[in-house]
Amino acid sequence: MLLLAASVIFVNAERRRLINLIPDSVRKAWKDWEIEVLILGSLILQIVLILFGKRRQYVAKLWIRMTLWTSYLLADWIAIVSLGIIAQNTLDKCKQTSDDDNFKDELMSFWAPFMLLHLGGPDTITAYSLEDNELWLRHLVGLIIQSGLTFYILLVSLPGSSWLPFLSLFIFVSGVIKFSERSCALRSAKIENLRDSMLTSPDPGPNYAKFMEEYTLKKAEGFYVIADEVKEISLPIDHSYPTRKDKLLLISEAFDQFQTFKRLFVDLILSFQDRDNSQFYFKQLTPKDAFDVIETELGFAYDIFYTKAPVIYTPLGFILRVVTFSCTFFTLISFSLCKERSKYHTLDLILTYLLLVVAFLLEICALIVLLNSDWTKNWLSKGKHDRKFCQSFLLKKLCLRRSTNMRWSNGTPQYNLLSYCVEFKPPRCYRFQKLFRINELLEKHKYKKDELVTPGLKKLIFDHFQKFAGESNNKHDHPVLCTSRGTEALKGNDCSSLVWSTELEFDQSFLIWHIATDLCYYTDDSSSTRSIESKQSKQLSDYMLYLLVVCPFMLPIGLGMIRFRDTCAEAKEFFTERKVGKDLTIASRKLLTVNTEVGPAKVKGDRSKSVLFDACILAKSLKAKGNQRKWEIISEVWVEMLAYAATHCRGNHHAQQLRKGGELLTHVWLLMAHLGITEQFQINRGHARAKLIVK
C-alpha cells in the first residue's frame, strides 16, 4: 500500500511539473480556443471521410487506408470531447451575467447538435473494417448517451431570450437520425445478424410420422403396401435473358444474382435451382460481361458491409434523407436571415457558418452519391410507368454521366521471390527497423508492384472455368477445380510425369511453380517477343506470392511463410556466392546450370523447407516441352491454383478485402460459385415425394 501511495504521489508530482513547463500564455490561449480548434478539426475529418470513404473501394493504396483509419478513429473522439467541453462550459457559465459570455454560450449550445451530426458520420463509411460492425451495440449506447447529453445542453440554453435553441432542435433531429442510421447499418452488417436475415423459414419437410401411420394402418389391414418415390420436377429455368447487355441491364441482373449469392459471404449453402439458373445465365455472357457482373455484385457487397446502404436505400431511408436535408437547409437559411448575428464575435460567427455550410454541402454530396449509385440505377431500371420520367432524366442526365464508375482496383499486386532476393539490400537503418520489427512490413511494400487485370487474363480464367462448369452438375462429390491444384491441367496436356509438383502441400506446390515460372520466363529463347500466355502466367504467379506474403489468411493453412523465408535464404546465399548482380536473366541461368540429378531432399534433409532447386527440376522439365506448349501448360496450372485458393478462402476474408480495393481472388471465387464450381451447393435435390401404392 505504501508503495502504491508513493507511486501515485510521484505521478501527480511529475504531472504538475510537466504542466508547469507549459507557459501560462499557451495554456490560456488553448483554454480560450480549445472548442473552436476541436470543432474545426471535426469539420476537416468529416470532409476527409466523405471524400475518401468510397474511394478505398477502388483505390488499393496504403496512404488512403492510413488516412481513413486515422480520420475514422479521431472523428468520433473529437466529437465526443467537444460535446463534453460544451456541456462543462454550459454548466460552469450558466450563472454568469456577462453579456459576452452569454453570447458565447448561446453559440456553443448551437454547436452541440452539430457534433451529434458528425457522430452519425457520412453515408460512404460506417465501418472501417468488419470488426467495427461487431461493435454496433457500443455505438447504440453512444447514441443514447450523446443524444441525451446534447438534449440536456439544449434544455439548459432554452430559458434564454435567444432564438438559437429553437434552430438547434432542427440540427438535433438531423443528428439523431444520422446517428441512428449508422447504428442500424452497423447492426445489419454484423455477420451473425446478416446470416440470420438470410435464413429461410425452418423447413420440417414432408410429414414423415403421418405418412408412416397411414403406411402401418394399410399394412395392418392386410393390404400389400409399397412406398413409391415420386421424383420432383424442377422448375423450368428462366430463358428470358436478353442477348444484348447494356450497363443498366447488367446492373439489374447483377443485383438479382447478388440477392442469392450474398449468402456465400456468411457461409450459407445454395440450392440446385440457384446453381442451374446462374450457370445458364453466365454461360451466355462474354468474359468481360461476366466479370462486370461479378464486379457489380461485389460493389453491392461492399455497400452492405461498410456503408449505410442497407438503411438509406429503403422507403423509410428516403423519407429520413428528405427530413435531414430539409432540417439542415432550413437552419442555414434561418440563421442567414437573422438580424441578431451582429452581437456575436466575428470568429465565432465564421465558425458557425462553416458548420452550417459544410453540413449542407455534405448533404448535397450524400444526395449525389445516392443518385449515382448502383442501387438507384437498379431501382430505376426496373421502373414501371410511374418511374419513366425519373428513369429518363436521372439515368440519362445524371447517373450515366460517369460511365466509367469504378467498383474495384482492377489490379493484381505483384511480389516476386527471385526479384526480391536479387534486389534486396539492407538499408543503413536496418538494425533499427529490425529492433522495432517493422523491417518486414517495409519490405512488403518496398518490393511490391502493381499490374492491371487485362481483358486477356479475364478471358483465360473464364474460358478455363467454362470447361468444368458442365461437369460439376453430374457429380455429387467435390467439383474438380475445388480439389485440383493444377493436376487436371497437367493430365489434360499429357504431363503426368509432372504431377508430383501439384500433389505436394499447396504452399510448397505453388512456391515451386512460382520459381519455375520465373526460370522459364527469364531464360525463354524468345524473350524479346514474349507470348501473352507467358505474361499472364507470370502475373498470376507473382500475384499468388503476394497473397502468401501480404494476405496469408486468404490461402489454405500451411507452412507457406516458413518455406518462403527458407527459400529466400538459400537463394540469397546462392546469388552471393556466385556474385550475381541484379540481372534476373543471369540469375535464372545460373540456377539452371546446377546439376539436379540427386534430389535436394537427399542432400539437405527435411529441416530446411527451401524449394529452390525443386523448382529448378520442374523448370528443366517444362523447358523440354517446347516454348508454346510450355506456356499453355503453365497458364492452365496457375488458373487452377488460383481457383483452389479462392474456394478455400472463407467468405468473411473475401469481404474484408473489399475495403482494400478488392482482390482478383474474390472475383474468381464468386465467378466459380456462379458457374456451379463450389462446395457450397449441398442441396442436390428437393423434397422426396412418396405415395402409397396399395394392392
Image (cartoon, rainbow, N blue to C red):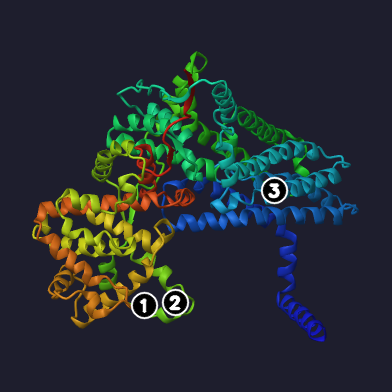
Three-letter amino acid code at disc 2? Answer: Gln
Judged from the image, the secondary structure of the residue bearing numbered disc 2 is: helix
Tell me where residue 266 appears, x and y as whole percent: 51, 45
| Numbered tag placed on residue 427 in the rendering | 1
Tell me where residue 677 appears, x and y as whole percent: 35, 42
Mark 3 or 2, which is nearer the eye? 2
Q: Name the residue under label 3.
A: 115
Query: Which quadrant of the structure image shows residue 27?
Result: bottom right
Q: Quadrant of the N terminus?
A: bottom right
Q: How crowded is mark 2: few (under 14 residues within 10 Å), some or many (20 or more)?
A: some
Q: What's the residue at 76%, 37% (across, down)?
A: 169
> Is the Cβ of the residue at disc 2 closer than 8 Å to that at disc 1?
yes
> Is the Cβ of the residue at disc 3 closer than 8 Å to that at disc 2?
no
State whether residue 592 appears in this view: yes
397 vs 470: above or below: above
| Numbered tag placed on residue 433 in the rendering | 2
Judged from the image, the secondary structure of the residue bearing numbered disc 1 is: loop
Which one is in front, 385 or 577?
577
Q: What's the residue at 52%, 54% (across, down)?
A: 68
